């Protein structure tokens, strides 16, 4: 069975999200209040999130029920298809079997509506009148804009300026859904104005955009903030990807040896990987779990595991994660969704436990793999997803060289239909590998907050 997608079988949509916190061999470090240095409580988060999401954030329950109104909307694109990439296997001449779970079938074209829909649902139920958020490449901003349209919630999106300029059609999609899209850093917030005063030509970062969105939400009791990655409740909502994949692989009579996802903040990676990791922890098959990041923003492979702010303006709580420092400014690569200075605390914790393996690749080799994939399988991947493809190709070629036949599963987190300018640059030879600035990294890491808990 080459395509396993539960045709029109709505009963196959998971009824519960999976929470990996229930299966961890060791609990993660607490989230700390930046002022007191003490663990945060629900009241500390109430200015930003509705209570239902706060409870999910701190939950240790293995399963959290998906509300029926959310499952009803999920039916528009879930279950998403699982494909066997036979033509890619043939093009590579590999002895490996390659599968991919395709999340580009959602209305917004990526995995992000898996969490934007429930976040909008819970905010609407709590009487919230407006949402603010940040976005890098625009996948998350588009998805929250879509969710806002579904539930009648206005949405303000602060989009990293370099992506705002690179991806005008993603911006247009947000506006089509009814959202307001602002290039970040902007003059609308104290955080934005501070950055622009220091550097009027700043290309922005996710850390800066988060500061702007958080600032706007915190000063208005009728407005809440929605985050597209990093936090536990966001990663949990994405678990529908891996839960479906487990069942679909069983239907195909197969089981992955290697599970791969690209990782910027961690939501797509967690979505595909955490349900399989849960099986690992509960005594199931021991699979290799691979998280792939850009070499230009090497959070897991070059960053430090330490308490840090999630935003550049230092408005968020302190979380222990792999970080490049909240003031680090990644190069303007086209995979804007992977240009975040930190990694999800839960993903970082799993890396410290040795449960996952990180890899980093340059953008030109990722685009090369994406083109190979597109010409074989017919789907043009998002630049972020190309990192997972590059890793899958590397593992498949390694298997060929070693005479092994592993089963590889990766998440194709979204399509690249709004990223064709990047492909045009690649074909024209204009796409270059932008190394991170070691001096800037050293400086950013030297400014990490001092935390007694460490």
Image: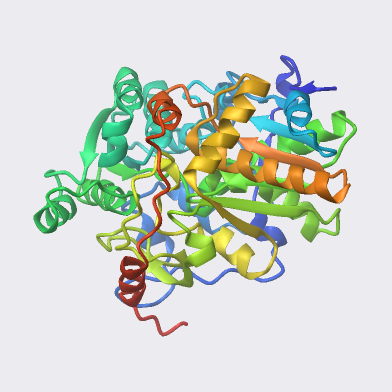
Which of 180 and 340 lies nearest the eye of the viewer? 340
As drawn, which residue projects farthest toward the left?
A: 197
Tag count in the figure? 0
Q: Left or right: 255 with respect to 29?
A: right
Residue 304: percent from the left, percent from the top? 47, 71
Residue 46: percent from the left, percent from the top? 36, 54
Q: Looking at the image, is 276 positioned above or below residue 29?
A: above
Residue 207: percent from the left, percent from the top? 32, 54
Question: Can see residue 400?
Answer: yes
As drawn, which residue projects farthest toward the top?
A: 8
What residue lies at 74% left-to-right and 35% top-to-bottom? 245
Q: Looking at the image, is 218 positioned above or below residue 444?
A: above
Which of 205 and 433 lies nearest the eye of the viewer? 433
Q: Left or right: 178 with respect to 289?
A: left
Which of 116 and 102 lies nearest the eye of the viewer? 102
What residue lies at 54% left-to-right and 42% top-to-bottom? 365
What residue lies at 74% left-to-right and 49% top-to-bottom? 276
């Amino acid at each position: 069975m080459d395509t396993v997608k539960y045709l029109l079988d709505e009963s196959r949509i998971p009824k519960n999200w999976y929470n990996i916190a229930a299966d961890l061999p060791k609990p993660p470090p607490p989230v700390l209040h930046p002022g007191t240095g003490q663990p945060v409580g629900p009241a500390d988060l109430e200015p930003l999130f509705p209570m239902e999401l706060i409870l999910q954030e701190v939950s240790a329950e293995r399963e959290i029920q998906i509300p029926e109104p959310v499952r009803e909307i999920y039916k528009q694109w879930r279950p998403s298809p699982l494909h066997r990439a036979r033509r890619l296997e043939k093009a590579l001449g590999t002895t490996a079997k390659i599968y991919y779970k395709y999340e580009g079938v959602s209305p917004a074209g990526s995995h992000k509506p898996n969490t934007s829909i429930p976040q909008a649902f819970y905010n609407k139920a709590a009487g919230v009148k407006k949402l603010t958020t940040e976005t890098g490449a625009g996948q998350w901003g588009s998805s929250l804009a879509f969710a806002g349209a579904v539930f009648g919630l206005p949405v303000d999106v602060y989009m990293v300026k370099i992506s705002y300029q690179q991806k005008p059609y993603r911006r247009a999609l947000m506006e089509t859904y009814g959202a307001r899209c602002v290039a970040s850093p902007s003059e609308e917030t104290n955080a934005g104005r501070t950055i622009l005063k220091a550097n009027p030509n700043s290309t922005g970062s996710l850390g800066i955009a988060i500061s702007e969105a958080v600032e706007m939400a915190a000063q208005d009791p009728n407005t809440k903030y929605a985050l597209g990655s990093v936090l536990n409740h966001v990663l949990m909502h994405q678990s529908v990807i891996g839960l479906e994949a487990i069942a679909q692989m069983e239907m195909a009579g197969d089981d992955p040896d290697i599970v791969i996802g690209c990782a910027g903040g961690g939501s797509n990676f967690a979505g595909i990987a955490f349900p399989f990791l849960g099986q690992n922890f509960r005594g199931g098959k021991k699979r290799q779990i691979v998280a792939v990041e850009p070499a230009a923003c090497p959070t897991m492979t070059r960053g430090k595991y330490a308490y840090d702010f999630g935003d550049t303006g230092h408005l968020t709580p302190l979380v222990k994660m792999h970080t490049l420092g909240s003031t680090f400014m990644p190069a303007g690569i086209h995979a804007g969704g992977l240009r975040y200075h930190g990694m999800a605390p839960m993903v970082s914790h799993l890396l410290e436990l040795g449960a996952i393996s990180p890899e980093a690749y340059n953008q030109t080799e990722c685009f090369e793999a994406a083109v190979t994939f597109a010409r074989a399988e017919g789907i043009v991947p998002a630049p972020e997803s190309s990192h997972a493809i590059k890793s899958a190709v590397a593992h498949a070629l390694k298997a060929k060289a070693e005479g092994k036949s592993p089963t590889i599963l990766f998440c194709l987190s979204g399509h690249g239909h709004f990223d064709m300018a990047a492909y045009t640059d690649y074909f024209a030879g204009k796409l270059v590998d932008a190394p991170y600035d070691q001096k800037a990294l050293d400086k950013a890491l030297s400014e990490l907050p001092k935390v007694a808990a460490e």
